[in-house]
Each structure stands twice: as C-alpha cells, then as structure tokens.
Amino acid sequence: MTWLAVWLVGLGLADLVRAASGGSTRWSVPAGAGTVAVLALLGGLTEPVDLVVLAASLLSLVLWQRLSRQAVDTGSGHVGALVALGAGVAWLLGLSGWASPVDGPLARWLAWADLPLVGPDPSAGGVLLVVGLVLVNLSTANVLVRLVLVAVGAMRPVLPDDLATADDPQPSDQLRGGRLLGPMERVLILGLGLAGQLTAAGLVIAAKGLIRFPELQATRKDGSGVDGVGIDHVTEYFLVGSFVSWLVALVSLALTR
C-alpha cells in the first residue's frame, strides 16, 4: 500500500494546514500536493506507473479539500466530498499491487536512524502508512466527523458572520473540547491497537461515554433542553460524532493489518 501511504501523508498534512489557516484551502492544496511529490522522490517511487497513479490521486485530494469545505460551509455537497475521499482510498488500494516498494533516500535514512518503535530493520512503506494514518486521524477525521454531523442535521453549517446570530446556539457549544479530544482519542486507539492492546482501546471508547454522560446530566434543564439546545440534539451530536470518530480510528487500524 505504498501509494496509499504517500497519499495519506499528503492528505493529512493538507487538512492540518487548512485547520491552521482557518479553513482556507489556499495553502492546503499546495502543501498536500507538494508532500506527495517530495515523498515520491525520496521514496524512490519514480517508475512511470508510480508517477501516473500518484499524479491521478492528487485529483481526489484536491476535490476533497474543495468539496468538504463547501459541504461544511453550506450544508450541501456532502456526497461529492465523501465520494472524492472514498474514491481516492479505493483507487490506491485497488492498484496497490503495481506499486513500487519504498526505497531511495527515505528507506536508507530510516535504516540508518534506528528510530524508537520502528526497529532495526524497518519497512519504509509501513512507517509511511502509520505516519499517514496518524495525520489523517489528527486532521482529516475532524473534517469528516463535522461533515457527517452537518449532513444528518446534528450541526448547522458554518455561515458567514453577517448571517450568524448569537441567539442560535450549536449543540457543540454544550460539549466543548471535541476538536481536541477527538484527535487525541483516535490516536490513542490507533496506538493501542498497533501495540496489540485492543482491550485497552475498547476501554478508551467506553471511558468517553462514562465521562460525557454526567456532563449531559449536569447541564440538563427541566428534562427538555441544554442552554437553548434540545437535549435530544446534544445527545445526537455526541453519539453520531463519537461513532464516526471511532470508525475512522478502527478503519485506520484495519489498514495496518
């Protein structure tokens, strides 16, 4: 899955840049495309088939950046964004048998560096895959979770400032910290899974529900709402967001097997 590993690193980095720039895709697209190009050169992926497939994969990366931003901002176009992301993964997985192994300067550096947790004889392709999955769980997964929440109506789209009103609260206003806790939780699940501690990963999932439940109960008012937002909306936001987040972490873990 050499191609997929390189593409995931580019995708995850692009979404990190987008998050750091306030949601703008001005720099995220060049950052993602440039990362894929640099890793292809450093990894020795310079055969014609490597270059053609990786160049084609950039279309999915660009479409994901543009369509996911549109979907989150306007509340429409979710199918196109999800298709772009899914097509990128499926395309690279389906053709992975033709990919060249990661070699070149990157593989030689990994063998020389003897990095912790990598081992004395590391698989450069495997290392790239894990790095890509970690980046995706840090950044891309947050976009995916938000996109699904908006698609099912658990959150409203992010409207321009002149259209937003202070009297129109979001369910996310009541359960703060999700954008930070979500990535931490996913990376922890992925790390525990890679270490073979699947039971511990399950405990992390269970702990989230136990921690959030008292928070919901403590802020509940008269059994009907939470600070202007119905308790049913807050619960839907929590459950849908959590399950999508967990699925991303579990699918990431499955890709490493």
Image (cartoon, grey):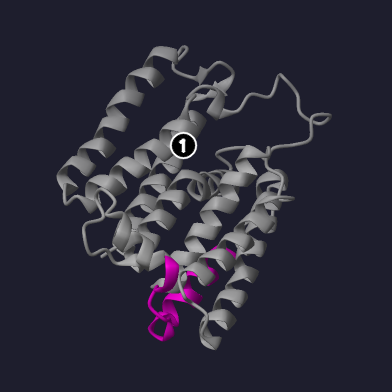
Helix, strand or loop for the magenta stretch, by majority: helix
The relative height of residue 197 versus residue 233 in the rendered view (above or below) is: below
Q: Nearer the viewer, residue 61 or 85?
A: 61
Q: Give how far across and how far down residue 231 sits, in percent.
A: 48, 25
Badge 1, how many Cα within 10 Å: few under 14, some, many 20+? some
Q: Give how far across and how far down residue 86 sits, in percent.
A: 51, 67
Q: Residue at x 62, y 69 (%)?
A: 58
Q: Give how far across and how far down residue 44 sits, in percent.
A: 47, 75
Q: From where the camera sits, is residue 153 visible?
A: yes
Please state, as top left, top right, bottom left or bottom right, where the C terminus lies in the image. Answer: bottom left
User: Hey, what amino acid is under mark 1?
Assistant: Glu
The residue range painted magenta reads 84-105
Q: Give how far across and how far down residue 115 sits, in percent.
A: 29, 51
Q: Nearer the viewer, residue 256 or 216?
A: 256
Residue 99 in magenta? yes
Residue on which the image places disc 1 = 236
